[in-house]
Image (spheres, rainbow, N blue to C red):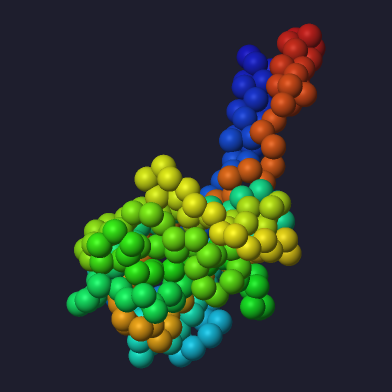
Amino acid sequence: MKLHTLTIALLAGLCLTFSQVNADLVVDNFNRPDGPLTGTLPTPGPGGVWTNHSGTPGDLLISGGEAVIQHGVPSEDTHTTFAGQTTGTLFASFDVRVEDDAPIGGSDAEYFAHFMRDGSNVFRARLDVVAGTQGGDYTFGISSGNSTAEAIFATDFNFGDVVNVGLGFDLDTGIGSLTIGGTTINGTGIFLDQDLDSFALRQSDSTNNETIFIDNLVVTNLNAIPEPGSLGIIGLFGIAGLIRRRR
């Protein structure tokens, strides 16, 4: 009986290890008291404390369970850290809601979210709010590493829409991507420097000074480590067989 219990425990432990290969790096639903985002821990976690890396600390706020990016007078850029990633595809999924009193103009291309390397100016997969192309209030743009959008999403959105976006950066090809509703567009730049360890939010002096609300953030690495192959499976059954033989 004891050996049988040990077999189950070993198998469960190994399976748990494999299931955590692509574990979340950051999870933040911003459900905590209103106030500055910087200095708070992601809720429910994991993720490092949100830390200012530019602008005035305390400018970027949490309000009503969302992070509030106010382009215009507020100036803060802040980020949350995770273990450095050198391979695979970093992917951040989050909900975006944009509000303004006039459609985004053609000169507005201010990025508001990206991956980065802590303590540096290495910013990758920069996500922009840009002028719509189909008569809507706005759409999104993506760049692999440049400060201005390299590709524009073909669908427009209206102020107040809640849009789930997927922001990606392939560390192996150096290309950023944007996925919305099953459609993906890619940046045109290639930036092969590696070791990204942070997700950042940015406020700037944007032309339209729109307000962007962020919620339900999840950051993961889609394929940092290959899934266990036949050797792993053989190993699991080998351990079980060895214990059975010893019985």
Using the rendered image of the protein, determine whether residue 13 is visible from the camera's viewpoint: no
Percent position of residue 19, x then y: 59, 35
Percent position of residue 162, x then y: 27, 57
Nearest to the observer: residue 56 or residue 152? 152
Tally the numbered discs: 0
Using the rendered image of the protein, determine whether residue 121 is visible from the camera's viewpoint: yes
Q: Quadrant of residue 121?
A: bottom right
Relative horizontal placement of residue 12, taking residue 241 as reference (left or right): left
Q: Residue at x 43, y 83 (%)?
A: 204
Percent position of residue 175, x then y: 62, 57
In the rendered view, tell whether residue 173 sits above or below residue 61: above
Nearest to the observer: residue 222 or residue 242? 222
Nearest to the observer: residue 212 or residue 149? 149
In the rendered view, tell whether residue 217 sits above or below residue 78: above
| Quadrant into which the N terminus falls | top right
Nearest to the observer: residue 163 or residue 103? 103
Q: Quadrant of residue 70?
A: bottom left
Q: Residue at x 63, y 63 (%)?
A: 189
Percent position of residue 188, x then y: 60, 60
Relative horizontal placement of residue 67, taking residue 117 as reference (left or right): left
Q: Quadrant of residue 58?
A: bottom left
| Quadrant into which the C terminus falls | top right
In the rendered view, tell whether residue 222 sits above or below residue 247: below
Relative horizontal placement of residue 193, taking residue 62 as reference (left or right): right
Q: Residue at x 36, y 75 (%)?
A: 106
Q: Residue at x 53, y 85 (%)?
A: 54
